[in-house]
């Protein structure tokens, strides 16, 4: 089939590639021209403006956005909404907040544009293995898009989940779970690393992937990470978060659902990014006040010997 | 090769079976005779007393215990220690606390008996897929046992991890991680279940197993569980724990390792087993004291209509 | 001085009383007339409509709202904004979300109305002991209001904290801390209650209030609660939350501040309100799938007689 | 009355002082002689050996130990047990693990020596305000000791709580609660410190102590700490723990009591002492593996100038 991919970052470019390899006609557009040129050489039809993108498609047009969530998605989506016509299809394949997708679907529906929110998982491995696609929004648009979805996903790897927002909601929870899984493995590896034994963590990850209850793809990646750097000596324990973990926690709170593991996984990421903890300073200061316990001075870390 | 399996519960019986199918000579013993008889019919050599068990083996004898951790293991292990001879091998394949295994290995070493602590994962699926075997203890005993280990495990599914206790320590952490993984999935599914969408959780689990970052065996089992009972309406949220989760937390505390996710996973199990929470009563009582907030009366739950 | 109290619930009525006792001229208004009549008998000037309320005051008028946060506050505030004149002062003494107060202050400022957001703590004891008042908003309005604040608060018990929202932000965090304190005491009492000893918890709370590090007003209230019902047998562990705990958690997340204790205190309240936990059901179901572990049937709780 | 204080650290010396001021005959002993000499000048009877200590007392002798928990307590206690006679009283006023106190009481009972475990709270302020004393053990010994307890404690500040271990159990839980309270305040102050407002935290702590729900002694100490250093710029957020927090968590686990707030308070202390978090490294490494997300290099922190 025919569709445009807008936003040619790591994810968007690879998805365009996978679609091209699947024999689809793929129009590609990006804010900066370089990745367009690259994909043109791989068989894509380059479009250097939103207008060109739309004109290169025949109705019902499919424009699939792979741009960062938040403002970038909002702007690109409005731009294309102005260019598309009733019956056309806009897809947001990024990591938008599901409530934004509900709102956007309603706004686009007023113009007759069909909207799909497609949560997309698979990371940099998706080009090879396929992307897991969680689809929410207009069901007729979903059916129209199925040939492309079938190419992008592994076998049985895409599914229609419900009305607008259902795709991004599912992706949000997916990522919240992902935070919890990663933290669980990470705590386990730290307990092993501090044990009286000298475990080879890559070997242990490999072993656990052979028949144990905790085998998983993340554990396969753990093996890779430990093979690359057995003690993780080269990297800092500084962990970003990209929004979906927090949205999961906010949603859990809105639902009155206790979600301690997902929440703590997020909060330990916050903690990982603090040079020092103000809360810990308060506790240390209080211990000094009531018990006369010594505190470490802030200078102790950096002070060298005085003459 | 030749070995005895002592303790023919679900795990022990299936391990004996898998060894028999692998062509090994398997002596089986159990406190109650029934499972011995069953396995005799499948080719095992039944031994109805510890003495018979030992006599049915040729030195160096291998006695592999699959009995519950704690007192049962302690007693059976002492019984066989008295019957075995220097050079023989005692294996604890149960879920013992790793410090017990360190202690037992030292005590057995004084008698010349070689000890292996083998953490065993795979559950009821091990018979079919093989067991993941984490081996600690005497390395010469490990080498002697390799033909059996190769049969019990899937390919590359067994490994020598270090001196006594290293196997059970690794299994303990494995289970701690398992607690965290399960709780992470469980929280995610609860957030989905309370969402404005009507997700088919079995379908979603199946979808996520097709290329997503969180694909895993536990997620495959989630699909099975939701196919069996889509809303889990038939079961109560009452979760036992079998020791290794708590040991993981205790070990983390001994190591000064923060392990919030594993710890909270354990504590939410505790909470699941409480009809009511005394702590929550205290909070409710305090809110009444300072704010005059209403409390629910304990009788409200059970009172029926009055005439 | 002169001011109107609008909203004569438990808090508003008692604050009006304390102001009357302090010799102020207090106009009182409420949606339903009964509490107005009550306070008229105690010396207040009753006003049965917003218009009457405003007319009973001389400029610069002070209207102090004590209505529930959210929609009720929004509506009453808009109503009075339409009736007041430039230079007048509107006070929100309720538990509004601080971002709402920032927004409202800006909207009122366009009309020349001065706004104060005053976080108010003290509960049902405030009438006797005074209310702790955390004041944000227009500083000139604060100065105008000081005679009333001095009456409402205990000595040194009111303070100007910063521009609009600073009062409600401080109150929000106050309540977040309160959640954490209550949960900490509650966990401690549960550990005592399950101990091998037979502690008299009221006596122990009383003892701890005599010189120990953890002495506090909440601990004094704990003593009261346990004297009232030594084992809390009459109440259920069902704990509501009124918004500010969640806002504290949301704000912490916005700030990238790890706040595990406040967060868990909130989540344990969620858990206290669940008859059963879906997450715990998932964990129980998974344990059945991989280990064949027994689950409790949902019917076990309620099974009635069979024919 | 007459008693010996053994162990003249900060706590022991001040307790001896308070007893002297109360008119008691106080024999003092310490491993190193200096603090003995100091207290002799304040009216105490110095004893430079355990033997001298015992000889300076008349039966029934009271020896009150104030030495660090663990090995030091064990050794001193055994030393005095050998010197004392049936009917004499040994008091452990330190922070022993309650199970140790149960064991010690039983061992001493075989020799006819009466044992009391007295949890002692009050820190460096106890000299002035009195110590909160939680007494477990032999009840006749408690009665004998009451004159001293009445001097040491503020009014109503001592109490007999039950058989051996009941005092240290109560003190353990007291400290567990203390961890939770401090962490709750600390999180709140961090949220304030990161807020859009510029709060004076000392002033806010002072304000909250005037009538708010969260007023407490720890909050008074918070005010002192912030007056001393308004932004805590001079100290590091490095927090020790002294055993009782961990024992509280272990005991909660043994009792199947979920205690997330106390547990997380302990674990955040562990985290505060880590230069970097291995768990966070694992999470960062996994994010690189599946998503190609950048990691921070360990060298980034420490790179110094090159020549």
Image (spheres, coloured by chain):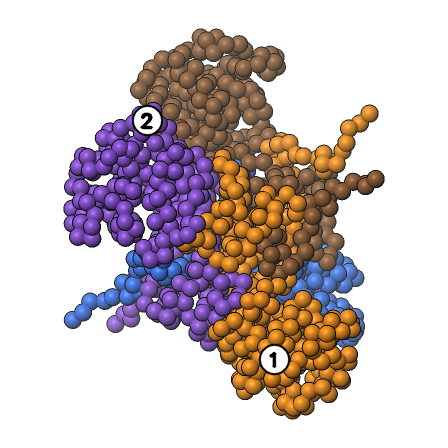
Chain colours: A purple, B orange, C brown, D blue
Query: At 53% from the left edge and 47% from the top edge, which residue is drawn?
Result: B202
Mark 1 packing: few (<14 Cα in 10 Å), some, or many (20+)?
some
Same-chain check, marks 2 and 1: no
Res. B290 image quadrant: top right
**Mark on residue C240?**
none
**Where does the image place residue B20, in percent across and percent down from the top left?**
63, 76
The chain under label 2 reads: A
For this rendering, which residue is in front, B89 or A274? B89
Q: Nearer the viewer, residue A281 or C284?
A: C284
- Would residue C306 be seen by someone viewing this image from the given angle? yes
A92 up-or-down from D241: above or below: above
Name the side, left or right, on which D164 lies relative to C265. Answer: right
For the C terminus of chain D, the image quarter is: bottom left
Crowding near pointer 2: few (<14 within 10 Å), some, many (20+)? some
Horizontal side of residue A279 vs B107, given as left or right:
left
Q: Is residue B1 above or below residue A279?
A: below
Residue at 39% in and 46% down: A133
The chain ID associated with circle 1 is: B
Q: Closer to the camera, A291 or C77?
A: C77
Give the residue number, with chain letter if any, for mark 1: B23
In this rendering, position of residue C242 left or right of residue A28:
right
- Provide residue C203's location: percent of width, then percent of height: 70, 47
Residue under label 2: A112
Using residue A111 as the reference point, say whether residue B29 is left or right of it. right
Residue drawn at x 76%, y 63% is D138
């Amino acid at each position: 089939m025919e569709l445009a991919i807008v936003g040619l970052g790591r994810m968007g470019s690879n998805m365009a590639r996978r679609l091209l390899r699947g024999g689809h006609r793929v129009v590609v557009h990006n804010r900066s021209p370089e990745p367009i040129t690259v994909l043109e050489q791989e068989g894509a039809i380059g479009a250097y403006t939103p207008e060109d993108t739309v004109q290169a498609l025949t109705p019902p047009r499919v424009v699939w956005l792979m741009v960062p969530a938040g403002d970038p998605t909002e702007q690109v989506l409005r731009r294309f909404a102005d260019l598309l016509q009733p019956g056309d299809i806009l897809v947001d394949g990024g990591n938008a907040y599901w409530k934004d997708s509900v709102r956007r679907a309603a706004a686009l529906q007023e113009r007759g544009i069909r909207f799909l929110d497609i949560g997309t998982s698979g990371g940099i491995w998706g080009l090879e293995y396929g992307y897991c696609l969680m689809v929410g929004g207009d069901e007729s648009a979903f059916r129209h898009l199925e040939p492309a979805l079938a190419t992008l996903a592994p076998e049985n790897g895409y599914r229609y989940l419900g009305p607008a927002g259902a795709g991004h909601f599912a992706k949000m929870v997916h990522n919240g779970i992902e935070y919890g899984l990663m933290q669980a493995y990470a705590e386990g590896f730290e307990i092993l690393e501090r044990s009286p034994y000298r475990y080879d963590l890559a070997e242990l990850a490999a072993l656990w992937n052979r028949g144990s209850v905790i085998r998983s793809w993340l554990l396969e990646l753990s093996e890779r990470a430990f093979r690359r750097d057995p003690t993780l000596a080269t990297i800092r324990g500084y962990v970003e978060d990209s929004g979906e973990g927090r949205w999961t926690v906010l949603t859990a709170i809105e639902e009155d659902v206790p979600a301690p593991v997902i929440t703590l996984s997020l909060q330990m990421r916050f903690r990982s990014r603090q040079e020092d903890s103000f809360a810990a300073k308060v506790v240390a200061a209080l211990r000094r006040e009531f018990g006369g316990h010594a505190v470490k001075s802030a200078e102790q870390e950096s002070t060298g010997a005085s003459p």
